[in-house]
Amino acid sequence: MVGRLVRAALTATAALLGLCFGWLAGYEPHLGHRQTNYPFLTESVPLPHHVPLFSGGLSLRFAMVHDVIHERFPKHGRVYYQERNRLTRQRLSTRAPADPASFPLADDLAAGLERLGKPGEAVVVMKEKLARQQAQGLTGGALYTTYANLGTFLIHAHFQKAVAGDPTARERFREGLALVKKSVEVNPQAHFGRERWQVAIAEFMLAAMDDPKLLQTFDCLGNRLDLKIEEILDRDSNRWGTGYGRAAFARPGSAGQASNEIPAFFQPGVKPDDSTQWTELSPIRNYITNVGAEEEWRDVAVSSHREPVPFDEPLLGIIGMWRQGGGANPHFALAIGEVMLRVGQRHIAWAAFERASRLAERFWPDPALQSFLRLHCRTRQAQMEKTFLPPSPEESLPPWRRDGPFLSPAEVADLRPRFDSELAYGEGYQRAYQEYEEKQIAAGVSITDEHFFDGFHTGREAIASPVGEEELFKWVPPRKIRDYAVSRARGWAVLSAGVAAVLAAALLRLVRRRSQPPIEPSPNSATPSVAAVPLPPQP
Amino acid sequence: MYRLLVCLVLAATVSPAAACINDSELPNHEREFRSQYRGSPAPPPAAASPEPAGRPSARLLVVGGGVLLTAAFALTFVGRRARN
């Protein structure tokens, strides 16, 4: 019995040694783990910019950026605004000037005049409105739309003369800028923070009027145009610096850190734009890649925008201004291109540069600056096209150039024709929308009828692009790698313990068998040996 | 004067960075805009790519190890008893 217990103890010791060896051998391959080794552990979460800047605010989607570049949104035509102005004047004529209900009508009339290319008349309407409001003692938020609209119309009305060098026009431009700043002060969260970016861009325009060379150095958000594409797209080198090349979680380990800090954001089924969760989720915005206000921007007189900001903030402002303001603009398209490049969205960036180059005539009056813009866009596009193609086997490329997915040469060659057809699709949609408006108005349908556009939308597919996987952050959480490594180590440890125990048990059995003495005969043996049988006593 | 006129003609082609305009339609436009892009895409299945083939599963290793451990202790406690 004792012998058996000793053998069991020896077997258990061997098992324990096997367990330790197996654990170490099983865990070792996962030390210094690289996420790329564990594609089967990948998880997807929304990108941090899905949490809006303000509670209940709008959050950016890359599809929105794609759609403004390609004009994929409805836009009213001139006939619509003519009709709206007619109706608005009718309504205004029935109200006393001091009637507060006339104030929004004044906004409508002025906005309609602006849309019809009459910003000067719009300024007159808004100045009358402001005087009536001030006479009633209105202040603060009550004056928001007046400040914002009057400021915008003053900027528009005097922009061209201000660019041409007219000092009076520049003074009116500054007056407009000050009013838009006031509108931000009284209502900072309005329209996704759009006016803030209107102020910054208008300040940049003013600075460029004094020094047009700025337009060759910066876009309207302060992104340097001379920043080399290698410096923008080399995600690994940028991890401790700008973070460029990624939309979020640039620093090594930052996603893991964020999942510890804001675990709710990483829960399956999280709703990032749910306003009830905003307080808990909003710290995730600290992990969005910042753009703009690059080196030497401090020397440019744009006091409202001094530091890099999360990329979604100016983009939402630009998208709002493009859709609800004056439409396509080379400065906006250029800024979109530079920002999209910096967050690694190369395809949208390519399209934005294409659009910017086609709008170059509206960039600045100086033909040399227009040529500069075209050349800059073509250079950026050519550099990006190289990165779209897979590296050839003999090519020695830095790691950032080896990132796929890649396009075939034929697909790269097709980029421009595809852009043409998609832009034509968007513009065609807008044309059809405006023609429909004209027909409805001619047929006597009221533009205030809530079913006015029903016939247009019936049977027509949605113009907005669907939101896709570009909005997901795919990663392998360190916790999952650790769990996986532990489960592998445990498996190998138990197997190794079993193998060691079997070997030990077999060895002990063999040793025991060899060391056993010869078998003694049993007293009940049927065939006792001669030596064993006692001889009878001799007489 | 001539220079100013030339500048004005050239500047006429230039567009201001037009801002958003506040009118009665704006809230409705913003509501529609928001609804068009609402939500996030559905995440792909948790394990998009399978665990590498040829790698024994951790469960198999544990079961195999368990069987071997049982066999080892059976070897220790069982056997040769009948001959004694």
Image: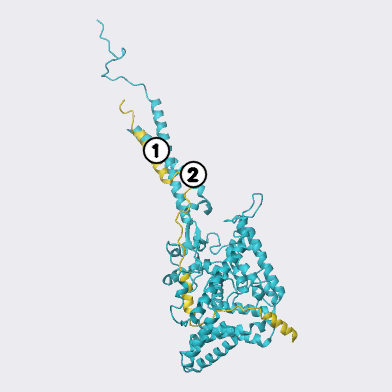
Chain colours: A cyan, B yellow
Query: Quick one: SS at disc 1?
Result: helix
The answer to which image quadrant residue A228 occupies is: bottom right
Q: Residue A65 carries which label?
A: none
Q: Which mark is residue A25?
A: 2
Q: Residue furthest top?
A: A539
- Horizontal side of B9 relative to A37 (left or right) equals right
User: Disc 1 residue type?
Assistant: Leu
The answer to which image quadrant residue A216 occupies is: bottom right
Q: Which residue is drawn at 28% across and 13% down?
A: A533
Q: Residue furthest left?
A: A539
User: Disc 2 residue type?
Assistant: Ala
Q: Which residue is drawn at 45% across and 43% down?
A: B56
Q: In this view, does A353 lie above or below B68?
A: below
Q: How crowded is mark 1: few (under 14 residues within 10 Å), some or many (20 or more)?
A: many
- Horizontal side of B68 relative to A206 (left or right) equals left
**Pick the front one: A432 or B69:** A432
Q: In this view, does B42 lie above or below A118?
A: above
Q: Residue furthest right?
A: B2
User: Which quarter of the image is occupied by the N terminus of chain A?
Assistant: top left
Residue A124, horizontal then vertical, whole percent: 57, 90
Look at the numbered discs 2 and 1 and tell me whether their residues touch, using CB distance below 8 Å.
Answer: no
Residue A129 appears anywhere in the view: yes
**Pick the front one: A227 or A360:** A360
Residue A190, horizontal then vertical, whole percent: 50, 79
Label 1 sits on residue: B68
The chain letter for the residue carrying disc 1 is B
Query: Quick one: SS at disc 2?
Result: helix
Q: How crowded is mark 2: few (under 14 residues within 10 Å), some or many (20 or more)?
A: some
User: CA separation, marks 2 and 1?
Assistant: 18 Å
